[in-house]
Amino acid sequence: MRVTDPEKHQAKKQMILEAAKACFAEQGFHQTSTAQICAAAGVSTGNLFHYFASKKAIIAAIVEEDLQQTQIFVAALREQENLVTALDAFFDVVLDVASDTAQASLALEIAAEAGRDAEIGVLYRLSTRVMREELEYLVSLGMERGQFRRQFSAASVVHCLMVIVDGIFSRVSVDPQFKPQEQKAALKTMMTGVLGLANGREAQK
């Protein structure tokens, strides 16, 4: 009986997933065939279906991976004493992703697919809910520590932050001239305005 090496199995699965991400980012979910994914990953069709039952299963795996990475990243932010700095780091990651053409395209494809497919929609809403709840926790904690003003509820602040984030990706999708990193200072000023820093930028010290 053949025994599967867990590490090799996971490595091969991840390789296929990364190849699929590149294809989806370039051509979109529905324009990408399993044959194209196989070619990009250097595997046979049978090999691909050994790891993923369908193209939809690959999409679901991408959303689930994003959820796991979000949880790990935000959990690390919780450990920081200065939550102004923590949310600043979160926003840096948002701008980095939005500035990467492939990553931004993939994020927009996932959001669009969530509106078309009920099962993907459930996973996507779970992912966004987890992000929202984790950010609300960070903002609430920052308010308790006096790092953010209590001018609005934590929920309202996070809703506004997510509007800014969604707006960045939306702008990237429709305006080739929009470069998130070039607008970093202005965008961060918007973010800090929503957060209502207790003592301006001095709260970071």
Image: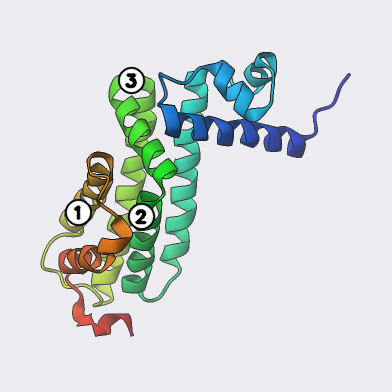
The residues bearing labels 2 and 3 have C-alpha atoms spaced at a distance of 26 Å
Q: Is residue 63 left or right of residue 43?
A: left
Q: Amino acid at mark 2?
A: Val
Q: Position of residue 172 (x, y in %)?
A: 27, 45
Q: Residue placed at 23% from the left, 44% from the top?
A: 175
Q: Is residue 116 above or below residue 101?
A: above
- The residue to which callout 1 is attached is 155
Q: Position of residue 43 (x, y in %)?
A: 69, 23
The residues bearing labels 1 and 2 have C-alpha atoms spaced at a distance of 19 Å
Q: Is residue 78 left or right of residue 125?
A: right
Going from N to C along the chain, the mark reached first, 3 or 1, is 3
Q: Amino acid at mark 3?
A: Ala
- The residue to which callout 3 is attached is 118
Q: Residue placed at 20% from the left, 69% from the top?
A: 189
Q: Are marks 1 and 2 in contact (CB under 8 Å)?
A: no
- The residue to which callout 2 is attached is 94
Q: Is residue 177 left or right of residue 36?
A: left
What's the coloring here?
rainbow
